[in-house]
Image (cartoon, helix red, strand yellow):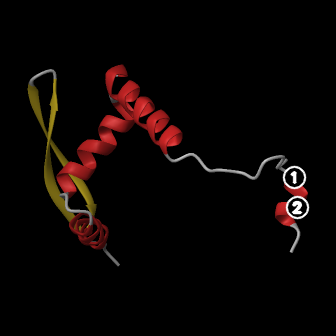
Amino acid sequence: MMIKAACFKLYYRKWGGVMNITLSADAKLVRATRRYADRHNTSLNNLLRQYMQTIGGDDKFHAQRAEEFKRLATEHAGRSEQGFVFDREDIHRR
């Protein structure tokens, strides 16, 4: 059985230039990913661009993500009762 593939173009901006990339993927996967993108108010193109930036991006991008994580961890840190001590065995007891 032959798998149908969907081709689409991705425009990737880096240092002011645009590189046209053609990718091939299973049509069912593309449709599912487009639905995911739609639910998250973005596009398949943007999801792929963000993913590429995540795995191959410059240090500035990673530094921004690290700062955002640090900010969220600080602002939304969990609170434990005074004297609480983490015990892995307690967590796994049912």
Looking at numbered disc 1 in the image, what kind of residue is underneath it? Asp
Q: Which residue is depicted at the point 84% across and 46% down?
A: 83
Q: Nearer the viewer, residue 62 or 26?
A: 62
Residue 87's label in the rendered image is: 1
Please rate how many residues cluster around mark 2, counting C-alpha atoms within 10 Å: few if below 14, some from 14 to 19, many from 20.
few
- In the drawing, does residue 69 fall left or right of residue 36? right
Where residue 49 appears, x then y in whole percent?
A: 24, 43
Q: Which residue is depicted at the point 21% across and 67% down?
A: 38
- In the drawing, does residue 54 fall left or right of residue 4? right
Q: Which of the 4 image quadrants contains residue 71?
A: top left
Looking at numbered disc 2 in the image, what kind of residue is underneath it? Asp
Quadrant position of the N terminus in the picture? bottom left
Q: Nearer the viewer, residue 84 or 27?
A: 84
Please rate how many residues cluster around mark 1, counting C-alpha atoms within 10 Å: few if below 14, some from 14 to 19, many from 20.
few
The answer to whether the residue labelled 1 contacts the one labelled 2, judged by CB atoms less than 8 Å apart, is yes
Where residue 74 appears, x then y in whole percent?
A: 52, 38
Reply above or below: 15 against 87. Answer: above
Q: Nearer the viewer, residue 10 or 53?
A: 53
Quadrant position of the C terminus in the picture? bottom right
Check disc 2 and report the residue beneath it: 90
Q: Which of the 4 image quadrants contains residue 60?
A: top left
Mark 1 secondary-structure assignment: loop
Mark 2 secondary-structure assignment: helix
Residue 68's label in the rendered image is: none
